[in-house]
């Protein structure tokens, strides 16, 4: 049940420095593209993989600088007894505090005994895998893991091409399921010369236990293999050996012909079954090839919901479905600042799980606008569409996203914004001005942490700002939009109600022909439009249309204070990187 306790990366591809203490179970790396997530998986695979050599190139060095060696160090805990043998590895055994993540160079009481395996590549591009401890380095001692011990550490990589694990090839997950070993040389030759079916008769009994586990796992995951999986010769194999033995369905169809998602799902389930032999799994783009319901099943098979944590899984994702299925402490946000990469877990505190369920998409972006409600989301999106039509780069194209805080108190917008700030996101809070922030110091704390905010003016909601400060022609366009969305009858009812019967929609329109929309009528329209139960534009799509079709085209004729607020929004959105 070996586990990775600490990962250190220096000068590898896009990562100059990373020091990370992963969790014991699922570690899902999230962040914008090119942030180094897949590089982290590659680093683990290269360091722990059972290989005697590996081809490296100058492009594997950070900044193409081959004068600074690539160093990948993986500290391993939960070691089997063979790796804690003092006679063999004594000078390299170290101590690790499971509570604090502290690593000490010598083991001691209360600390877990661990080993650090280091991969180093210098300018000659020749890799070396050695054990490391400070005291051994001082004594100039050098030792590598025995080959049989290296094989105990090999992680299972469930990548795009998972089908290699559906044959008995070297390193395949099938060879880890049970202690059964094939000894079928003569049968292989005969089968290759005769027929695949003939060989299947010979191989089946020797692999019965493995085939039974494959059938059970496939059935539980909904992958169709029939009542009994078979071990027949792979028709595509060109060599005669164990790798020529491949899984087939009851009908004799090679399971390697399964779709990408089905293949990954089955291999993940088999890896779970083989956890006693190989406990670390690597999955890049876990959602690849899977519908949401099968992705959820894959996460379950990897132990995402299990308290016992059967596998230590390192995965990457760009799927909100994955994020909603996982707990906050199973996620790690990858960020790079000043050459230093970090992988930070949101955890479960401070409303994190609720934020994760409600706004999973935001965790996959670079910049986030936390909006008080659907009105602000729609308005910001509509303005972005208008600016894009005018030639600007869309906020979405720059890696931005919107979070709907669900209305209510503006306090929750700043609180939610703080959560994202702590994880390294760029955050703007966008709220109405009709409700005060009730928590003392909340805004100051948010700004001090690097956040920014835009608030409509005191006492005014978005609808008030629109009707008070747009031109008469734009107000006319707003009323036409309201007529399309909710109907003239409801508009008239709201105006009559908010004016206590003193003003009607008809009288207001008549006055407009003479004096335009008076300040009093504009205020009344703002009140009527934001009716709590039946607001005229109270939806993302409604305000998106208003911003794109009405506000944007008329922005140059609006009141200067309103334009300055929209300019602030433009400056922040266009600065996203």
Image (cartoon, grey):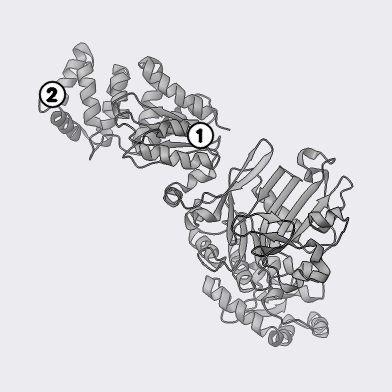
Q: Is residue 171 among what the camera can see? A: no
Circle 1 residues within 10 Å: few <14, some 14–19, many ≥20: few
Identify the secondary structure beneath mark 1.
Answer: loop
Residue furthest toward the front?
A: 109
Q: Which residue is mark 1?
A: 449
Q: How many marks?
A: 2
Q: Residue 212 in the image: x percent, y percent? A: 61, 82
Q: Quadrant of residue 482?
A: top left
Quarter of the image where the N terminus is located: bottom right
Q: Is residue 2 left or right of residue 137?
A: left
> Is residue 127 depicted above or below 376 in this figure?
below
Between 373 and 140, the one lying in front of the other is 140
Residue drawn at x 14%, y 21% is 507
**Sequence-earlier tag: 1 or 2:** 1
Residue drawn at x 56%, y 40% is 424
Residue drawn at x 14%, y 31% is 497
Q: Which residue is mark 2?
A: 503
Residue furthest toward the top?
A: 514
Residue drawn at x 79%, y 47% is 70
Q: Residue 564 in the image: x percent, y percent? A: 42, 19
Label ID, residue 32: none
> Is residue 401 depicted above or below 155 in this figure?
above
């Amino acid at each position: 049940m070996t586990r990775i306790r600490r990962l250190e990366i220096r000068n590898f591809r896009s990562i100059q420095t990373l020091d990370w203490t992963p969790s014991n179970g699922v570690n899902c790396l999230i962040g914008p593209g090119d942030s180094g997530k897949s590089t982290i998986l590659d680093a683990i695979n290269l360091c722990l993989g059972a290989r005697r050599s590996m081809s490296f190139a100058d492009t594997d060095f950070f900044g193409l600088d081959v004068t600074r060696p690539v160093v990948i160090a993986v500290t391993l805990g939960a070691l089997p007894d063979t790796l804690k043998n003092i006679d063999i590895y004594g000078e390299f055994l170290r101590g690790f505090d499971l509570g604090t993540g502290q690593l000490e160079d010598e083991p001691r009481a209360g600390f877990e005994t661990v080993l650090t395996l280091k991969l180093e590549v210098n300018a000659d591009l020749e890799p070396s895998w050695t054990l490391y401890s400070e005291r051994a380095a001082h004594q100039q001692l050098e030792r590598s893991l025995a080959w049989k011990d290296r094989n105990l550490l090999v992680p299972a990589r469930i990548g795009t091409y998972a089908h290699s694990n559906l044959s008995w090839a070297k390193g395949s997950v099938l060879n880890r399921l049970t202690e059964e070993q094939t000894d079928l040389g003569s049968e292989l030759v005969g089968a290759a010369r005769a027929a695949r079916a003939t060989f299947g008769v010979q191989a089946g009994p020797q692999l019965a236990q493995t085939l039974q586990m494959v059938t059970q796992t496939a059935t539980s995951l909904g992958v169709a293999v029939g009542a009994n999986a078979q071990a027949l010769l792979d028709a595509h194999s060109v060599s005669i050996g164990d790798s020529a033995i491949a899984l087939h369905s009851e009908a004799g169809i090679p399971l390697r012909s399964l779709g990408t998602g089905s293949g990954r799902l089955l291999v993940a389930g088999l890896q779970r079954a083989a956890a006693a032999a190989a406990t670390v799994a690597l999955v890049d783009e876990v959602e690849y090839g899977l519908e949401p319901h099968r992705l959820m099943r894959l996460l379950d098979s990897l132990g995402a919901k299990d308290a016992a944590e059967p596998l230590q899984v390192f995965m990457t994702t760009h799927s909100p479905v994955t994020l909603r299925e996982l707990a906050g402490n199973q996620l790690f946000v990858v960020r790079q600042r000043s050459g230093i990469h970090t992988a930070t877990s949101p955890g479960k505190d401070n409303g994190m799980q609720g934020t994760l369920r409600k706004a999973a998409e935001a965790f996959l972006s670079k910049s986030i606008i936390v909006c008080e409600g659907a009105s602000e989301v729609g308005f910001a999106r509509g303005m972005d569409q208008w600016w894009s039509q005018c030639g600007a780069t869309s906020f979405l194209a720059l890696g931005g996203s919107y979070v709907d805080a669900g209305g209510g108190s503006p306090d929750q917008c700043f609180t939610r914004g703080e959560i994202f700030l702590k994880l390294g996101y760029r955050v703007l809070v966008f709220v109405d001005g009709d409700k005060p922030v009730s928590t003392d110091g909340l805004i100051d704390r948010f700004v001090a942490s690097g956040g920014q905010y835009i608030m409509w003016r005191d006492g005014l909601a978005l609808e008030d700002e629109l009707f008070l400060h747009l031109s008469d022609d734009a107000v006319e366009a707003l009323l036409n939009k309201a007529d399309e969305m909710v109907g003239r009858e409801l508009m008239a009812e709201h105006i009559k109600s908010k004016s206590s019967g003193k003003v009607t929609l008809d009288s207001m329109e008549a006055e407009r022909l003479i004096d335009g929309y008076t300040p009093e009528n504009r205020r009344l329209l703002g009140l009527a439009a934001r009716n709590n139960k039946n607001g005229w534009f109270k939806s993302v799509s409604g305000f998106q249309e208003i911003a794109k079709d009405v506000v944007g085209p008329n922005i140059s004729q609006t009141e200067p204070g309103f334009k300055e607020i929209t300019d602030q929004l433009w400056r922040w959105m266009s600065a996203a990187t």
